[in-house]
Amino acid sequence: MKSRFAVTLMWLLCLSFFSCLNKPVEKKEVTASEKRIEPKQKTQVPCVKIYGYGYLPIDNLEFLESELERYYPSVEVVRQHLKLPKEYYHRERNRYSGTGLLKDLKRLRKGCIVLGVTDEVIYKANELSPTYGIFGISPVGGHVAVISLTLPSGKRHTKDHLVKLMLHELGHAFGLNHCSDELCLMVDAEHGNKFSHTPAFCHSCKSFLSAKGWK
């Protein structure tokens, strides 16, 4: 009698155990406030490093830095000045090769965009002259640029024109070609000075630079 009772009890316990195993687990709904929101990863943009050649006063570089920070989030002035390479100096014209200075700056890139600034006149060979004076130079998408504070005439740029020159050359460095919009900062100077008539980047150039991290 006791044996039959024990067997019956064991069967009841087994049935109860298996019924618990087969019981569906209720899923708890998670509210939006309880969900873990993953922080968006910030897009890393390369730093623009500004180097001065010769004995250029640091104030000039800091002025360009403060102006560029209005357009780009990562700018740094390198306080160690660079020596102007003698091999790029044209003694007769008293000016330096812009393409030569670009070669000099490429060694400093290391993942950054490099802007070289000098107060010496710079030149680039073209159909008009092998030592044609220029304001600045930058290969499209090359991540290096050179600008001069001094016009080929020997006069200095106004602050407004200097900032526009910097933005124009950095636009090339980031990948912009010349623009057909006559009011855009990226318009071709065509051996002249159009900065008085170019107030800003056009919509198309702004969109391009925005995708590159510009403000």
Image (cartoon, grey):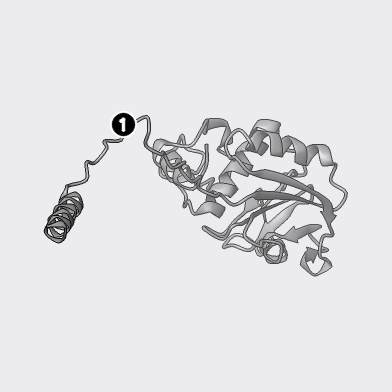
Rendered image quadrant of residue 2 = bottom left
Numbered disc 1: secondary structure? loop
| Left or right of 145 on screen, residue 198 | left
Furthest residue in direction bottom, as rendered:
87
95, above or below 75, in the image: below
How far across and down, in percent of the image, does residue 5 sit?
14, 55
Label 1 sits on residue: 31
**Residue shown at 62%/60% (left/top)?**
111
Furthest residue in direction right, as rendered:
55
Rendered image quadrant of residue 69 = top right
- Report crowding for label 1: few under 14, some 14 to 19, many 20 or more residues within 10 A (C-alpha): few
Furthest residue in direction front, as rendered:
1
The disc labelled 1 sits on which kind of residue?
A: Thr
Q: Nearer the viewer, residue 131 or 19?
A: 19
Q: Nearer the viewer, residue 164 or 174?
A: 174
Q: In the rendered image, is residue 191 in sight?
A: no
How far across and down, in percent of the image, does residue 44 sit?
54, 49
Q: Quadrant of the N terminus?
A: bottom left
How far across and down, in percent of the image, does residue 183 sit?
46, 34
**Residue shown at 76%/59% (left/top)?**
96
Rendered image quadrant of residue 122 = bottom right
87, above or below 195, in the image: below
How far across and down, in percent of the image, does residue 189 sit?
54, 45
Q: Nearer the viewer, residue 14 or 86?
A: 14
Q: In the rendered image, is residue 164 in sight?
A: yes
| Left or right of 190 on screen, residue 145 | right
